Image (tube, rainbow, N blue to C red):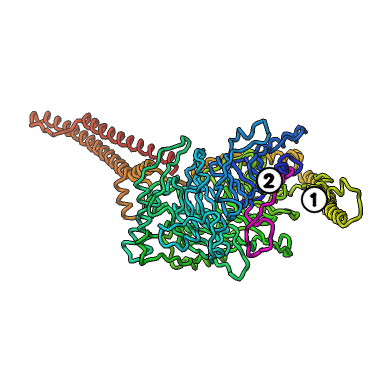
């Protein structure tokens, strides 16, 4: 879970230039005539729907203020604020206005993943703007810039039509600088897929694919007409008008390589009554698969066909397997399209024509919302299941890139109007399904039975604890995914932002379930047991201290070295933000994936210091929120009365300007209106002044308390200094506290430096925890083989003893023993020969004497080996022994060097 370390930074608070992005006078926009219906608040006249007023591209933000858009570059805004504060110069403008042809207030800003298009949504209409490059937006000329815009569906998304529920960019779209894919979902459960092309104006006028979920739910054949009713066409009454009123939609994946192949092409739609439907696969005519999409689809289709053939299953399941196999086979047989854009590296594929472009509607998935409770679902977020790399690659090296940290099941989060977020699991999974062809389903109609989701936990956002339970307005909860942490999201409800993290629980459950090939019968019991532990960690990261006239918008998540890890929201012409620690983010990124480079900002240095101490992660509390003066101090005193005069009808205006002042009912009404207007302004001024007075009083008390603490600390330091002088040993030199502190700091810095060096070395050695390559494995096997031949690392036992006898070390010992034996034998033979030689000499002398004395006798003769020949033979044996010993010593030395190099 991300650790919050600060509130709204000072360069986004008034009166800094960064705050003017949201606090400058709001352009007047006429109120949008709302047709949204709510069973909970039928009398509500204010806007009740999603508010996504900030879009983000890197460190650039696009903020919707009324019916205008303001662009700002946060990194440059922060640098300019620091420079102006240092030099004391006049603040420079921090934003640039972007003109768009939008009449009513903007409700949502959704930027495409490529950053080339921006969807501008009101209650009913959608404008698609082409976003200029950063260099064009950051020109010296900061005048208003008119954007190139296209109206989406001029006869479809119009004022008398159905209000918008969700506007999404397709994660598998063929996204280039001029093309992309947008999906719109209306409250009447109409899904439209728009394949946008700047060179084709017709692509903005008519969708490439349009589906009415209410018709599709009752569909029997894929040859039926499921297109939504055209504008102005009358329709009869249907129960689905209430049971299938769409609240929000989202895709099940983000287009990542480690996700399930079906996730990114599955559209999940939540109805207001709590039912959830899935549309899989929903693809544009041209789409870009990931590197694992097609292999995963092929593997799953083939394995499912093999399972269907081997088992006796019902007709619907067999038909679904055949349709998946046909669909995947068409993808495998088609070749990818040539690259239209040189910057595009992913291959582009055509959507299969068979079985159909419109899939079957799967569901409803029930999450267990009680019908007696007046609760409406407001938003939905889906975490995709992880890709099963073992089944995909069957033990190849590529399977090592996909860890078991993710959940193998789909995780669904639903936000309700009761201020709670419900977390559930889909244990069966969703895959591609289609309706049968016409004629094949004469006696077989697909049955759509409700499926019960496994509810894991319910997170209470604590709205009643914030401002009491006296409020009667029903909150609208919006969910926004965190772009830094994979299983973390932010919930915006009324006056607060709540961070909900499932990272730890999903990681723990993924590791537990990674060894199971399929769900077992005890899985439900284990999930129920796991529910007893904490599943989601919720923390309020932003909370407005005062009541706001408008709820907070959905936040934008920014993670950059210059701005830090920042969550930014806005409301009532003010910015609200929270800063988070980036240290844990980058430590996790080094273990799992690539990330941004470490920052060298002071905040990052503090974070590094905290990470080195395992116990210091909770020692530093978040910084205090900066006091922001009330906006009423900045307003012109006569502005309310001026606005009142502008709203007056012409007869009353003439009473004030042309006609003399006379007592009349009209004048009484006018004076009463003026009194109410002035009383509201004075009440706001009194409240703001009282708040300022209370803060000044509290500041004075805190300063007095800090002065008292500093005095006590000075006394303690003086006591420590005096006690240090008394504890000196004889002959020890006196060292003051400052010198000792500097020495301690130098030693600490040296330890930190050594620690960083060791950490970098260890990180390089174990980064990624990848397995060895084939060459490295072969090299290790060769080293182990040489070690076994030498006799290193042999196991004990009979087999180890037998292998030890055949090793080079054993042979070396045998040769040494033989050499010793030969030396001893040669020495013994030499002594024996010398003794025999002496005996022969003695006998020769005796024979000579006897022969001389006897006058003649026959000579004795014996076969003798010369001493020179014996010495030559012994020298040859010793040379052979020395040569064998040198060879063994060279092999032993080489093995020792290889052992040191390999780190074994």
Asked if residue 504 shows in the view, the reply is: yes
**Residue contact between numbered discs 2 and 1, judged by CB atoms under 8 Å:** no
Residue at 69 percent across and 41 percent down: it is 744
Residue 727 magenta-highlighted: no
Residue 38 magenta-highlighted: yes
- Relative placement, left or right, of 790 versus 209 is left
- Relative placement, left or right, of 317 versus 648 is left
Q: Position of residue 601 (x, y in %)?
A: 65, 39
Q: CA distance from mark 2 to mark 1?
A: 28 Å
- Relative placement, left or right, of 94 versus 853 is right
> Where does the magenta region start and end?
24-50
Residue 47: which quarter of the image? bottom right
Residue closest to the eye, 545 or 761: 545
Look at mark 1 in the image and give the residue it sits on. 649
Residue at 24 percent across and 36 percent down: it is 830
Look at mark 2 in the image and give the residue it sits on. 65
Disc 2 crowd rating (10 Å Cα; few below 14, some 14-19, many 20+) is: many
Give the answer, above or below, for where 83 lies relative to 123: above
Residue at 58 percent across and 62 percent down: it is 272
Asked if residue 502 shows in the view, the reply is: no
- Relative placement, left or right, of 867 versus 218 is left
Residue closest to the eye, 64 or 393: 64
Q: Position of residue 505 (x, y in %)?
A: 55, 58
Disc 1 crowd rating (10 Å Cα; few below 14, some 14-19, many 20+) is: few
Q: Earlier in the sequence, mark 2 or mark 1?
A: 2
Q: Main secondary structure of the magenta part?
A: loop
């Amino acid at each position: 879970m991300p650790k919050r370390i600060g509130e709204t930074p000072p360069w986004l608070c008034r009166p800094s230039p960064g705050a003017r992005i949201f606090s400058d006078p709001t352009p007047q926009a006429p109120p949008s005539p709302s047709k949204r219906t709510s069973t909970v608040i039928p009398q509500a006249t204010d806007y009740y729907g999603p508010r996504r007023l900030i879009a983000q591209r890197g460190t650039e933000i696009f903020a919707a203020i009324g019916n205008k858009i303001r662009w700002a570059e946060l990194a440059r805004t922060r640098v300019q604020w620091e420079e102006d504060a240092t030099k004391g110069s006049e603040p420079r403008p921090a934003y640039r206005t972007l003109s768009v042809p939008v009449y009513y207030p903007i409700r949502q800003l959704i930027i495409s993943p490529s950053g080339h298009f921006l969807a501008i949504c009101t209650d009913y209409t959608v404008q698609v703007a082409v976003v200029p490059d950063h260099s064009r937006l950051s020109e010296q000329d900061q005048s208003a810039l008119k954007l190139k815009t296209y109206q989406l569906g001029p006869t479809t998304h119009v004022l008398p039509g159905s209000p918008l529920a969700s506007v999404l960019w397709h994660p598998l779209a063929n996204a280039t600088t001029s093309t992309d894919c947008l999906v719109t979902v209306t409250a009447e459960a109409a899904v439209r897929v728009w394949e946008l092309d700047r060179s084709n104006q017709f692509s903005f006028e008519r969708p490439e694919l349009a589906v009415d979920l209410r018709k599709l739910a009752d569909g029997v054949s894929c040859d039926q007409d499921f297109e939504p009713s055209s504008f102005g066409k009358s329709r009869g009454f249907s129960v689905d008008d209430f049971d299938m009123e769409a609240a929000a939609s989202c895709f099940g994946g983000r287009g990542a390589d480690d996700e399930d192949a079906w996730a990114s092409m599955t559209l999940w739609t939540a109805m207001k009554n709590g039912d959830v439907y899935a549309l899989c696969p929903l693809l544009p005519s041209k789409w870009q698969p990931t590197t694992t999409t097609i292999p995963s689809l092929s593997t799953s289709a083939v394995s499912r066909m093999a399972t269907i053939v081997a088992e006796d299953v019902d007709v619907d399941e067999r038909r679904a397997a055949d349709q998946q196999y046909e669909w995947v086979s068409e993808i495998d047989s088609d070749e990818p399209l040539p690259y239209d854009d040189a910057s595009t590296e992913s291959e582009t594929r055509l959507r299969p024509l068979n079985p159909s472009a419109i899939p079957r509607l799967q569901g409803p998935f029930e999450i267990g919302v009680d019908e007696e409770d007046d609760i409406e679902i407001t938003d939905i977020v889906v975490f995709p299941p992880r890709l099963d790399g073992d089944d995909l690659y069957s033990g190849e090296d590529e399977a090592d890139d996909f860890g078991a940290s993710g959940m193998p099941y789909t995780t669904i989060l639903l936000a309700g109007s009761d201020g709670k977020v419900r977390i559930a699991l889909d244990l069966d999974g969703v895959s591609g399904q289609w309706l049968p062809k016409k004629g094949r389903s004469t006696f077989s109609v697909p049955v759509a039975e409700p499926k019960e989701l496994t509810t894991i936990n319910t997170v209470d956002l604590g709205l009643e604890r914030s401002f009491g339970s006296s409020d009667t307005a029903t909150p609208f909860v919006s969910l926004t995914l965190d772009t830094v942490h994979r299983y973390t999201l932010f919930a915006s409800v009324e006056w607060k932002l709540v961070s909900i993290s499932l990272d730890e629980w999903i990681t723990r459950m993924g590791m537990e379930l990674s060894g199971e090939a399929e769900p077992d019968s005890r899985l439900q019991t284990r999930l129920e047991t796991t529910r007893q532990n904490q599943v989601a960690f919720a923390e309020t990261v932003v909370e407005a201290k005062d009541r706001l006239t408008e709820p907070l918008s959905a936040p934008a998540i920014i993670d950059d070295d210059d701005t830090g890890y920042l969550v930014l929201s806005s409301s009532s012409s003010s910015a609200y933000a929270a800063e988070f620690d980036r240290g844990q983010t980058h430590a996790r990124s080094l273990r799992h994936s690539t990330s941004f480079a470490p920052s060298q900002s002071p905040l990052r240095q503090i974070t590094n210091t905290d990470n080195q101490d395992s116990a210091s992660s909770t020692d530093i509390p978040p910084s205090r929120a900066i006091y922001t003066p009330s906006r009423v101090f900045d307003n012109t005193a006569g502005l309310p009365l001026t606005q009142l005069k502008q709203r007056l009808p012409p007869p009353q205006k003439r009473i004030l300007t042309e006609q003399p002042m006379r007592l009349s009912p009209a004048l009484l009404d006018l004076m009463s209106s003026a009194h109410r207007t002035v009383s509201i302004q004075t009440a706001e001024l009194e409240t703001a002044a009282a708040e300022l007075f209370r803060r000044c009083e509290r500041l004075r008390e805190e300063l007095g308390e800090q002065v008292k603490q500093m005095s006590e600390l000075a006394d303690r330091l003086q006591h420590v200094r005096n006690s240090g002088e008394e504890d000196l040993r004889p002959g020890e030199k006196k060292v003051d506290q400052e010198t000792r502190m500097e020495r301690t700091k130098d030693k600490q810095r040296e330890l930190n430096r050594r620690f960083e060096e060791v950490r970098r070395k260890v990180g390089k050695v174990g980064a990624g925890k990848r397995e060895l390559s084939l060459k490295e494995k072969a090299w290790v096997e060769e080293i182990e083989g040489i070690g076994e031949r030498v006799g290193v690392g042999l196991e004990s036992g009979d087999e180890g003893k037998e292998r030890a006898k055949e090793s080079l070390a054993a042979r070396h010992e045998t040769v040494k023993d033989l050499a010793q034996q030969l030396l001893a034998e040669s020495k013994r033979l030499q002594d024996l020969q010398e003794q025999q030689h002496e005996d022969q000499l003695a006998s020769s002398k005796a024979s000579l004497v006897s022969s001389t004395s006897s006058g003649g006798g026959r000579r004795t003769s014996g076969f003798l080996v010369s001493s020179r020949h014996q010495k030559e033979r012994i020298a040859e044996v010793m040379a052979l022994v020395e040569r064998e010993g040198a060879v063994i010593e060279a092999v032993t030395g080489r093995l020792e060097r290889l052992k040191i190099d390999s780190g074994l």
